[in-house]
Amino acid sequence: MTLRIEQLSKQYKNGVKALSQISLTIENGILGLLGPNGAGKSTLMRILATITKPSSGSASWNGRDLIKDANALRPYLGYLPQDFGIYPHLSAVEFLSYLAAAKGINGPTAQKRIQQLLEVVNLQEAQKRPLGTLSGGMRQRVGIAQALLSDPKLLIVDEPTAGLDPEERVGFRHLLTELSGDRVVILSSHIVSDIEATATDIAIINKGLLICHERPETMLRQMEGQVWEMLIPSAELSSLKERYIVSGTVRTSQGIRIRLVAPAKPTFDAIALTPSLEEAYLSALAQAKNGRNAA
Protein backbone atom coordinates (compact mmCIF):
# COMPACT_ATOMS: atom_id res chain seq x y z
CA MET A 1 0.00 0.00 0.00
CA THR A 2 1.44 3.37 -1.00
CA LEU A 3 0.05 6.88 -0.60
CA ARG A 4 2.11 9.43 -2.51
CA ILE A 5 1.73 13.20 -2.14
CA GLU A 6 3.62 15.54 -4.46
CA GLN A 7 3.84 19.35 -4.17
CA LEU A 8 0.42 19.53 -2.53
CA SER A 9 -0.78 23.09 -1.78
CA LYS A 10 -4.03 24.59 -0.54
CA GLN A 11 -4.95 28.27 -0.60
CA TYR A 12 -8.43 29.36 0.44
CA LYS A 13 -10.47 32.09 -1.26
CA ASN A 14 -9.67 34.53 1.57
CA GLY A 15 -5.98 34.23 0.66
CA VAL A 16 -4.97 32.01 3.58
CA LYS A 17 -2.40 29.44 2.46
CA ALA A 18 -3.00 26.32 4.56
CA LEU A 19 -0.47 24.06 2.80
CA SER A 20 2.58 24.81 0.68
CA GLN A 21 4.14 22.18 -1.59
CA ILE A 22 3.88 19.19 0.75
CA SER A 23 5.54 16.03 -0.60
CA LEU A 24 5.35 12.70 1.26
CA THR A 25 5.47 9.01 0.43
CA ILE A 26 3.64 6.91 3.02
CA GLU A 27 3.64 3.12 3.10
CA ASN A 28 2.33 0.46 5.48
CA GLY A 29 2.63 1.58 9.08
CA ILE A 30 1.62 4.61 11.12
CA LEU A 31 2.54 8.14 10.10
CA GLY A 32 2.33 10.43 13.12
CA LEU A 33 1.40 13.95 12.05
CA LEU A 34 2.56 16.66 14.45
CA GLY A 35 2.31 20.43 14.39
CA PRO A 36 0.90 23.41 16.27
CA ASN A 37 -2.77 24.40 16.00
CA GLY A 38 -3.36 25.94 12.59
CA ALA A 39 -0.32 24.27 11.05
CA GLY A 40 -2.35 22.67 8.23
CA LYS A 41 -2.64 19.10 9.56
CA SER A 42 -6.44 18.89 9.35
CA THR A 43 -6.44 20.47 5.87
CA LEU A 44 -3.99 17.82 4.66
CA MET A 45 -6.11 15.05 6.17
CA ARG A 46 -9.31 16.40 4.60
CA ILE A 47 -7.60 16.46 1.20
CA LEU A 48 -6.41 12.87 1.63
CA ALA A 49 -9.91 11.87 2.77
CA THR A 50 -11.21 13.29 -0.57
CA ILE A 51 -13.35 15.91 1.22
CA THR A 52 -11.33 18.99 0.18
CA LYS A 53 -9.58 19.57 -3.13
CA PRO A 54 -6.05 21.02 -3.18
CA SER A 55 -5.19 24.20 -5.07
CA SER A 56 -2.29 22.43 -6.77
CA GLY A 57 -0.20 19.29 -6.56
CA SER A 58 -1.15 15.63 -6.72
CA ALA A 59 -1.95 12.66 -4.51
CA SER A 60 -2.18 9.01 -5.52
CA TRP A 61 -3.23 5.76 -3.87
CA ASN A 62 -1.36 2.74 -5.24
CA GLY A 63 -0.69 4.70 -8.42
CA ARG A 64 -4.29 5.93 -8.93
CA ASP A 65 -4.94 9.68 -8.85
CA LEU A 66 -7.25 10.34 -5.89
CA ILE A 67 -7.64 14.05 -6.70
CA LYS A 68 -9.16 13.39 -10.13
CA ASP A 69 -10.84 10.13 -9.15
CA ALA A 70 -11.90 10.10 -5.49
CA ASN A 71 -13.68 6.77 -5.99
CA ALA A 72 -10.27 5.15 -6.47
CA LEU A 73 -9.74 5.57 -2.73
CA ARG A 74 -13.10 5.79 -0.99
CA PRO A 75 -13.82 2.03 -0.83
CA TYR A 76 -10.52 1.60 1.04
CA LEU A 77 -10.81 4.67 3.30
CA GLY A 78 -11.68 5.05 6.97
CA TYR A 79 -11.79 8.60 8.35
CA LEU A 80 -12.32 10.06 11.81
CA PRO A 81 -12.39 13.87 11.64
CA GLN A 82 -11.51 16.06 14.60
CA ASP A 83 -15.11 17.29 14.83
CA PHE A 84 -17.11 14.08 14.60
CA GLY A 85 -20.85 14.62 14.26
CA ILE A 86 -23.50 12.23 15.58
CA TYR A 87 -27.26 11.74 15.49
CA PRO A 88 -28.06 12.16 19.21
CA HIS A 89 -31.31 10.18 19.18
CA LEU A 90 -29.77 7.09 17.53
CA SER A 91 -28.07 4.37 19.53
CA ALA A 92 -24.52 3.28 18.70
CA VAL A 93 -25.88 0.16 16.93
CA GLU A 94 -28.42 2.17 14.93
CA PHE A 95 -25.85 4.81 13.98
CA LEU A 96 -23.25 2.26 12.89
CA SER A 97 -25.90 0.27 10.99
CA TYR A 98 -26.91 3.41 9.10
CA LEU A 99 -23.30 4.18 8.18
CA ALA A 100 -22.65 0.55 7.23
CA ALA A 101 -25.60 0.67 4.81
CA ALA A 102 -24.24 3.90 3.32
CA LYS A 103 -20.95 2.10 2.72
CA GLY A 104 -22.73 -0.83 1.08
CA ILE A 105 -22.28 -3.21 4.02
CA ASN A 106 -25.65 -4.81 4.70
CA GLY A 107 -27.41 -7.55 6.62
CA PRO A 108 -25.63 -10.13 8.77
CA THR A 109 -22.20 -9.01 7.58
CA ALA A 110 -22.82 -5.49 8.89
CA GLN A 111 -24.22 -6.65 12.22
CA LYS A 112 -21.31 -9.03 12.79
CA ARG A 113 -18.81 -6.28 12.00
CA ILE A 114 -20.60 -3.79 14.26
CA GLN A 115 -20.57 -6.19 17.21
CA GLN A 116 -16.86 -6.88 16.66
CA LEU A 117 -16.10 -3.15 16.65
CA LEU A 118 -18.25 -2.40 19.69
CA GLU A 119 -16.19 -5.01 21.53
CA VAL A 120 -12.93 -3.50 20.22
CA VAL A 121 -13.89 -0.01 21.48
CA ASN A 122 -15.47 -1.37 24.68
CA LEU A 123 -19.00 -0.13 24.09
CA GLN A 124 -21.01 -3.37 24.33
CA GLU A 125 -22.86 -2.30 27.47
CA ALA A 126 -23.78 1.12 26.07
CA GLN A 127 -24.58 0.04 22.51
CA LYS A 128 -28.34 0.70 22.79
CA ARG A 129 -28.15 4.03 24.61
CA PRO A 130 -28.89 7.22 22.59
CA LEU A 131 -25.64 8.80 21.48
CA GLY A 132 -26.71 12.12 22.96
CA THR A 133 -26.56 10.58 26.45
CA LEU A 134 -23.01 9.24 26.07
CA SER A 135 -19.91 10.95 27.45
CA GLY A 136 -17.49 12.69 25.10
CA GLY A 137 -15.04 9.81 25.39
CA MET A 138 -17.73 7.23 24.58
CA ARG A 139 -18.87 9.21 21.53
CA GLN A 140 -15.25 9.36 20.40
CA ARG A 141 -15.12 5.56 20.61
CA VAL A 142 -18.19 5.39 18.38
CA GLY A 143 -16.28 7.60 15.94
CA ILE A 144 -13.35 5.21 16.00
CA ALA A 145 -15.71 2.29 15.34
CA GLN A 146 -17.31 4.01 12.31
CA ALA A 147 -13.88 4.71 10.83
CA LEU A 148 -13.12 0.99 10.97
CA LEU A 149 -16.45 -0.25 9.56
CA SER A 150 -15.18 -1.15 6.10
CA ASP A 151 -11.87 -2.60 7.35
CA PRO A 152 -10.06 0.24 5.54
CA LYS A 153 -6.63 -0.01 3.97
CA LEU A 154 -6.09 3.73 4.55
CA LEU A 155 -7.14 4.91 8.00
CA ILE A 156 -7.01 8.66 8.72
CA VAL A 157 -7.67 9.75 12.31
CA ASP A 158 -7.55 13.36 13.45
CA GLU A 159 -7.08 13.82 17.22
CA PRO A 160 -8.63 10.39 17.93
CA THR A 161 -7.79 10.28 21.65
CA ALA A 162 -9.45 13.61 22.48
CA GLY A 163 -11.82 12.95 25.38
CA LEU A 164 -10.48 9.47 26.13
CA ASP A 165 -9.25 8.66 29.61
CA PRO A 166 -5.67 7.33 30.06
CA GLU A 167 -6.75 3.67 29.97
CA GLU A 168 -8.80 4.22 26.80
CA ARG A 169 -5.88 6.05 25.18
CA VAL A 170 -3.55 3.13 25.86
CA GLY A 171 -6.13 0.73 24.44
CA PHE A 172 -6.49 2.83 21.30
CA ARG A 173 -2.71 2.95 20.85
CA HIS A 174 -2.60 -0.84 20.97
CA LEU A 175 -5.46 -1.04 18.47
CA LEU A 176 -3.67 1.26 16.01
CA THR A 177 -0.47 -0.76 16.33
CA GLU A 178 -2.36 -3.99 15.59
CA LEU A 179 -4.10 -2.43 12.58
CA SER A 180 -0.96 -0.97 11.01
CA GLY A 181 0.61 -4.17 9.76
CA ASP A 182 -1.16 -4.33 6.40
CA ARG A 183 -2.49 -0.80 5.98
CA VAL A 184 -1.54 2.86 5.99
CA VAL A 185 -2.55 4.77 9.12
CA ILE A 186 -2.25 8.56 9.42
CA LEU A 187 -2.57 9.75 13.00
CA SER A 188 -2.74 13.43 13.88
CA SER A 189 -2.47 14.33 17.55
CA HIS A 190 -1.28 17.17 19.75
CA ILE A 191 -0.44 14.53 22.38
CA VAL A 192 3.18 13.72 21.53
CA SER A 193 3.15 10.61 23.73
CA ASP A 194 0.43 9.08 21.51
CA ILE A 195 2.64 9.60 18.46
CA GLU A 196 5.74 8.36 20.30
CA ALA A 197 3.96 5.15 21.34
CA THR A 198 2.61 4.23 17.91
CA ALA A 199 4.23 5.98 14.93
CA THR A 200 6.65 4.25 12.59
CA ASP A 201 7.27 7.59 10.82
CA ILE A 202 6.73 11.18 11.89
CA ALA A 203 5.95 14.24 9.80
CA ILE A 204 5.99 17.71 11.35
CA ILE A 205 4.05 20.50 9.67
CA ASN A 206 4.31 24.16 10.66
CA LYS A 207 2.58 27.09 8.93
CA GLY A 208 1.67 24.83 6.01
CA LEU A 209 5.24 23.64 5.43
CA LEU A 210 6.66 20.16 5.93
CA ILE A 211 9.67 20.75 8.17
CA CYS A 212 10.54 17.16 9.08
CA HIS A 213 9.81 13.61 7.90
CA GLU A 214 11.83 11.02 9.79
CA ARG A 215 11.60 7.83 11.76
CA PRO A 216 11.26 8.49 15.53
CA GLU A 217 14.56 6.80 16.30
CA THR A 218 16.34 9.04 13.77
CA MET A 219 14.88 12.16 15.37
CA LEU A 220 15.95 10.98 18.82
CA ARG A 221 19.44 10.08 17.62
CA GLN A 222 19.87 13.57 16.17
CA MET A 223 19.03 15.04 19.60
CA GLU A 224 21.67 13.09 21.52
CA GLY A 225 23.95 15.40 23.52
CA GLN A 226 21.47 18.28 23.35
CA VAL A 227 19.20 17.65 26.36
CA TRP A 228 20.33 18.64 29.85
CA GLU A 229 19.17 18.71 33.43
CA MET A 230 20.01 21.58 35.76
CA LEU A 231 19.06 22.74 39.24
CA ILE A 232 18.53 26.50 39.29
CA PRO A 233 17.08 29.19 41.57
CA SER A 234 13.49 30.00 40.60
CA ALA A 235 14.50 33.58 39.76
CA GLU A 236 16.61 32.33 36.82
CA LEU A 237 13.82 30.41 35.08
CA SER A 238 12.45 33.29 32.98
CA SER A 239 15.84 34.24 31.55
CA LEU A 240 16.64 30.61 30.70
CA LYS A 241 13.31 30.25 28.86
CA GLU A 242 14.33 33.20 26.68
CA ARG A 243 17.59 31.49 25.69
CA TYR A 244 16.68 27.79 25.54
CA ILE A 245 13.82 25.36 25.00
CA VAL A 246 12.77 24.40 28.53
CA SER A 247 10.86 21.12 28.20
CA GLY A 248 10.20 20.32 31.84
CA THR A 249 10.33 21.78 35.34
CA VAL A 250 10.05 20.26 38.82
CA ARG A 251 10.08 22.44 41.92
CA THR A 252 12.17 21.19 44.83
CA SER A 253 13.23 22.62 48.19
CA GLN A 254 16.62 23.47 46.62
CA GLY A 255 15.18 25.27 43.57
CA ILE A 256 13.78 24.24 40.19
CA ARG A 257 15.06 21.16 38.40
CA ILE A 258 14.69 21.75 34.67
CA ARG A 259 15.13 19.91 31.39
CA LEU A 260 16.33 22.06 28.54
CA VAL A 261 17.55 21.74 24.97
CA ALA A 262 20.93 23.28 24.16
CA PRO A 263 23.50 22.40 21.46
CA ALA A 264 26.29 22.38 24.04
CA LYS A 265 26.56 21.94 27.81
CA PRO A 266 24.96 25.13 29.20
CA THR A 267 26.70 25.07 32.62
CA PHE A 268 29.53 23.06 34.17
CA ASP A 269 27.11 21.15 36.42
CA ALA A 270 24.50 20.33 33.75
CA ILE A 271 23.80 16.61 33.36
CA ALA A 272 23.19 15.04 29.95
CA LEU A 273 19.84 13.27 29.58
CA THR A 274 18.24 10.88 27.12
CA PRO A 275 16.15 13.02 24.73
CA SER A 276 12.40 12.58 24.36
CA LEU A 277 10.35 12.84 21.18
CA GLU A 278 8.68 15.96 22.55
CA GLU A 279 12.08 17.63 22.80
CA ALA A 280 12.91 16.58 19.24
CA TYR A 281 9.58 18.05 18.12
CA LEU A 282 10.11 21.34 19.97
CA SER A 283 13.63 21.59 18.57
CA ALA A 284 12.39 21.07 15.00
CA LEU A 285 9.81 23.83 15.43
CA ALA A 286 12.41 26.20 16.90
CA GLN A 287 14.86 25.51 14.05
CA ALA A 288 12.13 26.17 11.47
CA LYS A 289 11.23 29.44 13.19
CA ASN A 290 14.87 30.54 13.42
CA GLY A 291 15.38 29.66 9.77
CA ARG A 292 12.47 31.87 8.73
CA ASN A 293 13.68 34.72 10.94
CA ALA A 294 17.18 34.47 9.43
CA ALA A 295 15.68 34.61 5.94
Image (cartoon, helix red, strand yellow):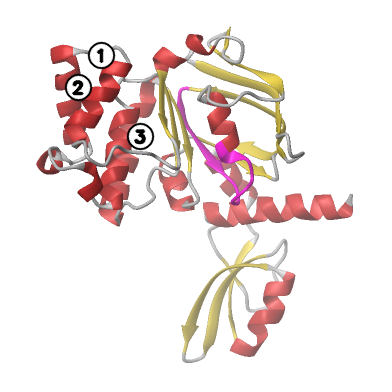
Q: Earlier in the sequence, mark 2 or mark 3?
A: 2
Q: Is residue 217 above or below residue 100?
A: below
Residue at the disc numbered 1: 105
Residue at the disc numbered 3: 177
Residue 40 inside the magenta-drawn segment:
yes
- Which secondary structure, mark 2? helix
How far apart, in angstroms, are the residues tagged by discs 2 and 3? Answer: 20 Å
Find residue 122 and name its label: none
Residue reaching furthest to the front: 89
Give, as a three-letter code, the residue at label 2: Arg
Residue 31 visible to the viewer: yes
How far apart, in angstroms, are the residues tagged by discs 2 and 1? Answer: 9 Å
- Which secondary structure, mark 1? loop
Give, as a three-letter code, the residue at label 1: Ile
Q: Is residue 101 above or below residue 202?
A: above
Give the magenta part as a residue range.
Answer: 28-42
Find residue 113 and name its label: 2
Q: Determine which quarter of the picture holds residue 95.
A: top left
Residue situated in front as seen by the camera: 69 or 218: 69
Give the image location of residue 9, x and y in percent. Answer: 71, 29
Mark 2–mark 1 CB contact (< 8 Å): yes
Give the image location of residue 281, x and y in percent. Answer: 60, 51
